[in-house]
Image (cartoon, rainbow, N blue to C red):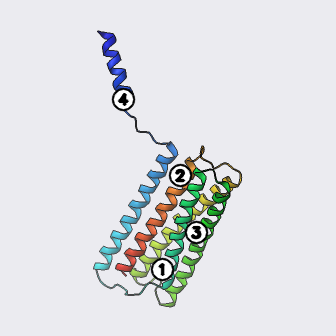
């Protein structure tokens, strides 16, 4: 009797699929959730403060749209790099990683130039809260994007050492996930600012 109960328990355990996640991926998702909470709080504060009045009305410079296009292109090249890594296509992997890094750095340079465009239309960090929020939101995103660029450069270096391949994809998956998240976050911010400037 005891043997049949033990056998049933073992069969039930073997039929139960355990959900597991690599510890590094879990840490990345916790980090992403914390970033989402920060930006949710900032955009909520933006809306509340805007409703109080004394809010500067301005148009976003065209450079914000150019930067958005650069970031979307970087997300596409990152996905192509990920696919190349899964297929052990090392040449394509390196090319797409370089392209992603170029687009990412171009976005950061473009963001810096966009702040100059804001100054040209009299939107400053100090003065009106509309400007302060704009610089804080875009600056916080730029900071997180710098961490993403560093991750991309680390993966690019690993790709040139042939350490990224179909049997070693954890860090590449993490890099791809984080980069797509940062791109999605920027799209959210861009649309939010377009609708609430």
Where does the image place residue 23, in percent across and percent down from the top left?
A: 50, 43
Report crowding for label 1: few under 14, some 14 to 19, many 20 or more residues within 10 A (C-alpha): few
The one of 79 and 189 positioned closer to us in this rendering? 79
Where does the image place residue 148, in percent across and percent down from the top left?
A: 56, 61
Residue at image mark 2: 173
**Left or right: 44 as drawn, with respect to 108:** left
Residue 193 vertical position relative to residue 14 in the rendered view, above or below: below
Report crowding for label 2: few under 14, some 14 to 19, many 20 or more residues within 10 A (C-alpha): some
Mark 4: secondary structure: helix
**Left or right: 115 as drawn, with respect to 17:** right
Earlier-in-chain disc, 3 versus 1: 1
Q: Are marks 2 and 3 in contact (CB under 8 Å)?
A: no
Residue at image mark 4: 15
Please give the name of the residue rendered at 33% of the width and 25% of the height, measured from the top-left corner.
Answer: 12
Find the distance from the CA under tag 4 to the CA under tag 2.
Answer: 28 Å
Q: Are marks 4 and 2 in contact (CB under 8 Å)?
A: no
Please give the name of the residue rendered at 60% of the width and 45% of the height, measured from the top-left corner.
Answer: 168
Residue at image mark 3: 104
Earlier-in-chain disc, 4 versus 2: 4
The one of 63 and 143 positioned closer to us in this rendering? 63
Residue at image mark 1: 65
């Amino acid at each position: 009797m005891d043997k049949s109960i033990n056998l049933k328990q073992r069969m039930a355990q073997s039929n139960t699929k355990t959900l597991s996640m690599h510890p590094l991926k879990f840490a990345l998702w916790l980090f992403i959730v914390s970033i989402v909470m920060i930006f949710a709080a900032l955009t909520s504060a933006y809306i509340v403060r805007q409703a109080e009045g004394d809010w500067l009305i301005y148009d976003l410079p065209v450079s914000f749209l150019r930067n958005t296009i650069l970031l979307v292109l970087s997300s596409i090249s990152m996905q192509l790099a990920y696919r190349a890594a899964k297929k052990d296509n090392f040449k394509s992997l390196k090319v797409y990683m370089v392209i992603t890094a170029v687009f990412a750095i171009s976005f950061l340079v473009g963001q810096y130039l966009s702040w100059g465009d804001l100054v040209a239309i009299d939107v400053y960090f100090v003065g009106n809260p509309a400007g302060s929020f704009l610089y804080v939101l875009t600056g916080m995103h730029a900071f997180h994007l710098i961490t993403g660029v560093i991750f991309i450069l680390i993966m690019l270096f690993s790709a040139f050492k042939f350490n990224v391949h179909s049997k070693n994809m954890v860090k590449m998956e993490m890099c791809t996930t984080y980069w797509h998240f940062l791109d999605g976050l920027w799209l959210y911010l861009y649309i939010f600012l377009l609708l609430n400037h």
